[in-house]
Image (tube, rainbow, N blue to C red):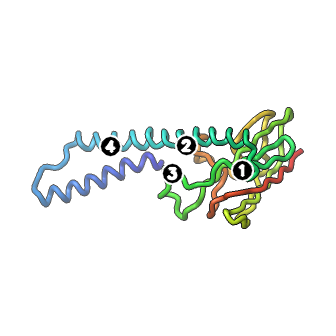
Amino acid sequence: MLFFWVPIVGLLIVGFFDFLFNRKKKESRLSIKGYLVLFIFFVVFFTWLLPLGQKYYYVERLDLMKEIFAAEDTDRVSTDGDIMVGLVGSEYDPLIRPLNRPRTYTNYFYLRNNGDTPYEGDIYLMLYDEDNEPIDIKLLKDVEAAPNDIQLLVENEDNMISDEWSESSFGTKQQVKAFEAIVGGE
């Protein structure tokens, strides 16, 4: 809905200022074609370019996820048997940063099932800041992963987000620098 209303509100604001400035100067106002061009620009920007940026950052996260799981860095990967949990990112959204009020960090945790059997169970994440002080504990319930599968861990399924490139694990008020994972399964 945001991408629908922003072009309309943008046109109303442009029209309002166009009306005020042209009334003072006694010049002709912007034509209907001018408003149509502005509207098309706003629609293209918010329906194509902004999601394109989100897709770009999604691909970057996937590449980083592969590197993290391959390197098995102990600060970014926790292993419990065949299950690996990796912290791929804890950052502000680079595209919609001003809309995140109060400021929250978007976190991306991925699960990798290296086993030959499916995984079903809960995952506890203990989150730490840069000083290794505890920030929060998250419980991810009823996680399911197929054999040899990699997936994003999500705390709450959000029905408002319909695309996988906009999805994140959860938000925190502080940046997560390290974590511990406790894998509980069947």
C-alpha gap between disc 3 and disc 4: 25 Å
The residue that disc 4 covers is: 39
The residue that disc 3 covers is: 94
Q: Which amino acid, by three-letter code, is at mark 1? A: Arg
C-alpha gap between disc 1 and disc 4: 44 Å
**Position in image of residue 137 (x %, y %):** 75, 61
**Position in image of residue 16 (x %, y %):** 25, 56
Choose mark 3 or mark 1, whichever is in front.
1
| Side of 107 where 145 appears, left or right | right
Q: Determine contact: label 2, label 4, CB under 8 Å.
A: no
Choose mark 1 or mark 4, whichever is in front.
1
C-alpha gap between disc 2 and disc 4: 27 Å
Q: Which amino acid, by three-letter code, is at mark 2? A: Tyr
**Position in image of residue 8 (x %, y %):** 36, 49
Residue placed at 58% from the left, 47% from the top? 160
Quarter of the image for the C terminus: give it: top right
| Side of 99 where 157 appears, left or right | right
The label on residue 76 is 1
Q: Earlier in the sequence, mark 1 or mark 4?
A: 4
Q: Earlier in the sequence, mark 3 or mark 1?
A: 1
Whether residue 159 is situated above or below residue 20 in the rendered picture: above
The residue that disc 2 covers is: 57
Choose mark 3 or mark 4, whichever is in front.
3
C-alpha gap between disc 3 and disc 1: 21 Å
